[in-house]
């Protein structure tokens, strides 16, 4: 893998066995970290994994697959 989803420097295991995740920047509320149970932490990470064969890029407007004006903008097969 080229880069992990969360920097190791921002993760910490507390003495109580919980996971402390530090944020890059403080939230508006002033929070700069969150403490989660290990299973909650894993559940939040797994929710970010897309299903197989799922396109991560979505096109809208004239670039969408069934747009009426797409033929005027995108070059077709020659």
Image (spheres, rainbow, N blue to C red):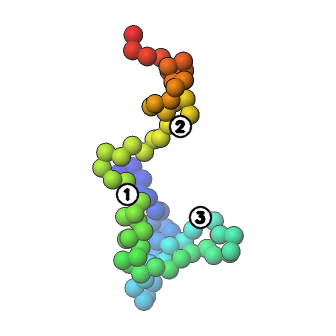
Seen at 56% across and 34% down, the residue is 61
Decide which of 13, 26 is in the foreground and name it: 26
Near mark 1 (Cα within 10 A), the count class, few <14, some 14-19 or many ≥20, is: few
x and y percentages locating residue 74 in the rendered image: 50, 21
x and y percentages locating residue 14 in the rendered image: 45, 84
Decide which of 51, 12 is in the foreground and name it: 51
Seen at 50% across and 29% down, the residue is 67
Instruction: Estimate the spatial distance between the alpha carbons at disc 1 and disc 3, rounded to whole Å.
Output: 21 Å
Camera-near label (1 vs 3) is 1
Q: Quadrant of residue 48?
A: bottom left
- Kindly identify which residue carries mark 1: 49
Seen at 47% across and 41% down, the residue is 58
Instruction: Estimate the spatial distance between the alpha carbons at disc 2 and disc 3, rounded to whole Å.
Output: 31 Å
Closer to the chain start, of discs 2 and 3, is: 3
**Residue 40 numbered mark, or none:** none
Q: Is residue 16 visible?
A: yes
x and y percentages locating residue 2 in the rendered image: 39, 49
Near mark 3 (Cα within 10 A), the count class, few <14, some 14-19 or many ≥20, is: few
Which residue lies most toward the left here? 52
Seen at 50% across and 69% down, the residue is 10
- Describe the element under mark 3 as helix, strand or loop: loop
Camera-near label (2 vs 1) is 2
- Kindly identify which residue carries mark 3: 24
- Kindly identify which residue carries mark 2: 60
């Amino acid at each position: 893998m080229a880069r992990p989803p969360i920097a190791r420097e921002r993760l910490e295991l507390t003495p109580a066995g919980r996971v402390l995740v530090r944020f890059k920047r403080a939230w508006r509320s002033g929070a700069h970290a969150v403490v989660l149970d290990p299973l909650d932490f894993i559940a939040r990470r797994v929710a970010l994994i897309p299903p197989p064969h799922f396109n991560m890029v979505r096109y809208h407007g004239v670039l969408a697959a069934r747009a009426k004006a797409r033929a005027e903008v995108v070059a077709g097969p020659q």
